[in-house]
Image: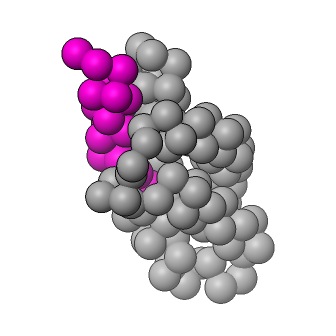
Amino acid sequence: MSDQAKGMEKVRAIDTEVAHVWMIRTFLKHADESEDDEDLRDIVRDLYDFILAVGPLDEVEDPAVYLKMARKKLSKLRKATELYEQIQPEVSGHTNFVMAARSLRTAVDRIAAVLAGTG
């Protein structure tokens, strides 16, 4: 398999997880709790920043560029995830918020594993 094909395989794996990040972002963005919580709004912005930076799968011309951007933005994505996990119990104990934290952690860990070459 060529390096280009291997790179696209990684891009597709990350894009699958980005779909989950998108849904979590959308849930948090539209939650009533976001109206009064600056940290939650920051998390929503940071998730969107990662999504926007890597861009949609069908626009990827060079997987190396996509993967480089994903690596660059991973730290911010991790920090947003950690912050959400930290504040989630205070924001709401509702199952939707608990599951959003678990889902976000899973997606971010999978993205990190792909970027590390173990996923």
The part of the image, by quadrant, that contains residue 68 is: top right
Where is residue 114 drawn, in percent x and y?
A: 43, 26
Report x, y in % for residue 65: 53, 41
Relative placement, left or right, of 112 versus 34 is left
Farthest residue to the right: give it.
Answer: 38
Task: Name the residue: 65% across, 85% down.
Answer: 35
Image vertical order of residue 7 relative to residue 15, above or below = above
Against 41, residue 86 (above or below) is above
Residue at the (45%, 16%) spot, across then down: 117
- Quadrant including the C terminus: top left
Residue 106, magenta (yes or no): no
Which of the pair 96/40 is nearer the observer? 40
Q: Nearer the viewer, residue 79 or 74?
A: 74
Magenta stretch: dominant secondary structure: helix
Residue 71 visible? The answer is yes
Q: Quadrant of the N terminus?
A: top left
Which of the 4 quarters of the picture holds residue 11? top left
Residue at the limit of the structure toward the left, as seen here: 1
Residue 102 visible in the shown view: no
Q: Write the residue at 33% across / 54% down.
A: 57
The one nearer the camera, 36 or 108, is 108
Q: Could you tell me residue 62's position as x and y percent?
A: 43, 42
Whether 4 is among the magenta residues is yes
Q: In this picture, is 18 found above or below 63? A: below
Q: Position of residue 43 (x, y in %)?
A: 66, 61
The residue that appears at 51% across and 52% down in the rendered structure is: 54
Q: Which residues are magenta?
A: 1-21
Say left or right for 8 vs 62. Answer: left
